[in-house]
Image (spheres, helix red, strand yellow):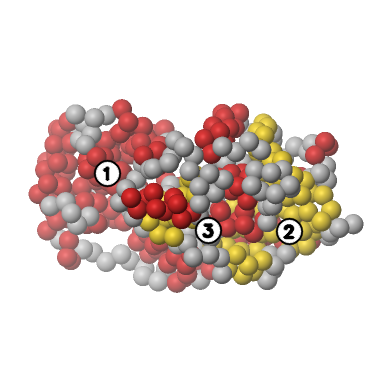
Amino acid sequence: MMTAREAALLALERCRRDGAWSGAAIDSILKKQTIPPRDAALASQLCIGVLQNSSLLDFYMDCFCKGKLEPKLRDILRLGAYQLLLLDKVPDHAAVSECVELAKRQNLSRASGLVNAVLRKLAANRDQLPQIPGQGSAGYLSIRTSHPLWLCEKLSEQRGYRFAEAFLLANNETPSLDIQVNRLKISSADYQALLERQGIEFRTDAQLDGCLSLKGGRVTELPGYAEGLFYVQDKAARCAVEIAGAAPGMRVLDLCAAPGGKSFSAAIAMRDQGGLIACDIHEKKLSRIREGAERLGITGIVCQANDARNYRRDWDSTFDLVIADVPCSGFGVIRKKPEIRGKRAEEIAGLPQIQYEILKTAARYVKPGGTLLYSTCTVLREENDAVVEQFLTEHPAFSATAFTVCDRHSENGMFTFWPQIDGTDGFFTAKLKRTES
């Protein structure tokens, strides 16, 4: 039977070697192995924790271990260092001995002595670890929070050092699991009663009916999953749909719909009355939206494969609401997908142009008096405010519209949610109106 540490190590290897998402990697491994629930939870925690703190762990490890380490050996040392330095519930002797055995089982017996020595030194010096250099600088933040230096520099420049520090630290916290009650099938109060009967803890949102936050757990094992009583969606994304103002009888287009949360929220706000076209460039992703809509009992969603940058004449000026949740760098969801922090600046340099092209195309589908919603799950100005500002300058038929949702107000029609402030994903949204004429 695979141990928790073996499962975590295998998931880390898949993330590093194959570019797999951590959540999908660890879930796939746990489904194929017979691992007790407690060990499965530890495996997930170890995998995510190492990814969230890799630069910090490397800094301390390198203080006691000189020379180049092969990738798998470094992963094993990171697992041990994470348990010793950042996890209270694992005894030192267990963290050290388990990682030594792990090295042996991974055909790294020649390095087991190194693993033992480095981890023992870390444990012995835990209360007097070397200081991270450059406190108050982007370099310090990069090591302390395990984010790329270029991102720490950019956020410090755009938002200020203290704000950037709070955001980066929040990315290393465990997020809640936000679910939205399917009010087409059950009231929020009745679903809450269902959770209470099963002893599942949750938090409600005072302003957003049906938005519940849980500590975590397997989504498919929550009550009412098979019956379609809820769907998973972060509060910020749900707020974006509320801002858009979807209503019964509307004709709505969701241009970049996968994985489907905004389409589902809009359809529920419309009481499944009207027409909603959900698009994605990949047919495989559309099948998941169809399956989700069927589970939720939503009949008004039609899925179509479509490249959001390509103009369709038959859609010109025909929609009351167009949602353009465009592809982005994803830096607002690092706490859920810690491997995103490994992106290089050059990888995302071309995104603002793609985002602008999608926004321009989306605007052509909005009928006079209609609404265009632009959103991303990132926090970088060049992907958010700058794209919208350029669009408004070049498209005088559109104007930004002030809005208030969940006690959040925007005079200029643009708003960014922040994890350290709002407890949500980092998320940007802008509400744009087309003039009547």
Helix, strand or loop at disc 3? loop
> Along the line of sight, which residue is nearer the eye, 205 or 323?
205
Image point 39% across, 53% down: which residue?
Answer: 193
Name which of mark 1 and mark 3 comes first in the sequence: 1
- Give residue 33's position: percent from left, percent from top: 27, 29
> Along the line of sight, which residue is nearer the eye, 5 or 160?
5
Location of mark 1 (residue): 41
Mark 1 vs mark 3, foreground winner is: 3
Q: Is residue 18 visible to the viewer in this orientation of the structure?
A: yes
Task: Give me the C-alpha separation between circle 1 and circle 3.
Answer: 30 Å
Location of mark 3 (residue): 209
- Give residue 318's position: percent from left, percent from top: 81, 44
Amino acid on which disc 1 is placed = Ala
Q: Would residue 98 be found to the left or right of residue 195 on screen? A: left
Location of mark 2 (residue): 432
Mark carried by residue 358: none
Q: Would residue 192 be found to the left or right of residue 352 on screen? A: left
Image point 19% across, 57% down: which residue?
Answer: 88
Mark 3 vs mark 2, foreground winner is: 3
Mark 3: few/some/many CA within 10 Å (<14, 14-19, 20+): some
Q: Would residue 159 be found to the left or right of residue 113 on screen? A: right
Mark 2: few/some/many CA within 10 Å (<14, 14-19, 20+): many
Quadrant location, the N terminus: top left
Name which of mark 3 and mark 2 comes first in the sequence: 3
Residue 309 occupies which quadrant of the picture?
top right
- Give residue 170's position: percent from left, percent from top: 40, 61
Image point 53% across, 39% down: which residue?
Answer: 296
- Give residue 176's position: percent from left, percent from top: 40, 54
Helix, strand or loop at disc 2? strand
Amino acid on which disc 3 is placed = Asp
Amino acid on which disc 2 is placed = Leu
Task: Give me the C-alpha separation between circle 3 and circle 2.
Answer: 25 Å
